[in-house]
Image (cartoon, rainbow, N blue to C red):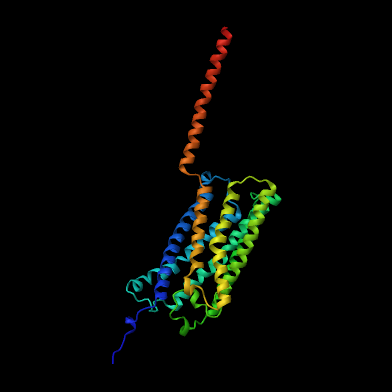
Amino acid sequence: MNVISSSSVVPSSSTVLLDFVLLFEHILSLCAKFGSVSLMSALLFIAHFRKGKLRVDSLSPCMQLYLVAQTVCSAMGIPYVFYMLFWALPHIWSGLHDNPYYSPYVLFWTGIIEISYITAAPCLVTLLALERCLILKTGANLNVSWLKHLLFGVGTLTFIGLWASTFILYLRELPLQLDKVSNCKTTSCETIRTLSIHSVAPKVVVGLINIVCCFGFLLMLRSFGMPANLKNRVVKMAIFTEIFFNTLPALGALLFNWSTGLVMANYVGELSISACPVDAFICAVIYWRNLVKRGGVAQQQQNNINLMTVAKPMTTMANRNVDRRQTIR
């Protein structure tokens, strides 16, 4: 009687495809995390210790909160991506696609931080939009110390509250149902009791609020005839990228869960989790390019100042020569 070992079983095409989709998503997520952490931490350093390199007087409270929260949460999520990527690579290269190569509890405890982050991240953009609307509507001066601390404190409590509530709700999955999650290759797969709805639904709600704030913000800019300054520009870009990379994928996952009772990550990978770091990286690039003076721009400004300094004595000398000629005549 021939005995077929489990290692000789040919994996299904869907399993192989999902492995490579996850591999691509994790590589993209890891690169985006390193990029966003580097750019945002550098921008925070410049804002506090090298203010002369900024194109604006200072960063608003909600802008600073956005940068701090994204930097910290992106850094905290790196262990999850490292585990997902480098633990799976040897198995994928060996063709062992059907083998359970993740530890369910390691996957859970590293993934819970990442899920909490992607749930709370959209509210940072909402706070940015509300802050700009407040400035346009009331003309509030954010250089006032008490107002700056108030906005930063309220925003921080809002973000931490949403992050912590997701973390606590996700703990409902404990103890893990090992008979059902032992073969999971995503942290979303382990949400047997909640189907990730507790993390996806708040994200969709906040995303819809962002859309409303976006329209309100644009209408206020148009009605007040305000110039498109740098801070307004970067906030608009942040809102649009958040809607595209966070709200739409989360809405698709929520509708899929409600209609089928299944987790969409089992079929298309962790699209929502991977899109959030990409969104943060794009916003980091936008902030960096728009708010930090580049070397070429600064050098050109210095050259213009030097030319004006040289041209002024030459103009004065020419005027004196004209006056002398008129006097001789």
Is 267 situated above or below 248?
below
The picture places residue 120, in percent across and down from the top left corner, at 57, 66
Q: Is residue 60 visible?
A: yes
Report which quarter residue 124 is drawn in.
bottom right
Which residue, as the protein is rendered here, is positioned at the far top?
A: 329
Outermost residue on the right side: it is: 138
Residue located 56% across and 56% down the image: 238
From the top left corner, tell me how far across and down residue 188 is, in percent.
Answer: 50, 74
x%, y% of residue 66?
56, 58
Q: Is residue 146 visible?
A: no
Q: Position of residue 81 (x, y in %)?
A: 44, 67
Above or below 50: residue 173: below
Which one is nearer the viewer's eye here, 151 or 197? Answer: 197
* Of 301 and 24, the residue lying toward us: 24
Residue closer to the observer: 57 or 95: 95
The residue furthest front is: 13
For the point 38% across and 69% down, the residue is 86
At horizontal 39% and vertical 73% (from top left) the residue drawn is: 16
Identify the residue at image location x=57%, y=13%: 323
Quadrant the C terminus occupies: top right
Q: Is residue 21 above or below residue 32?
A: below
* In the displayed structure image, the side of residue 238 where residue 7 appears, left or right: left
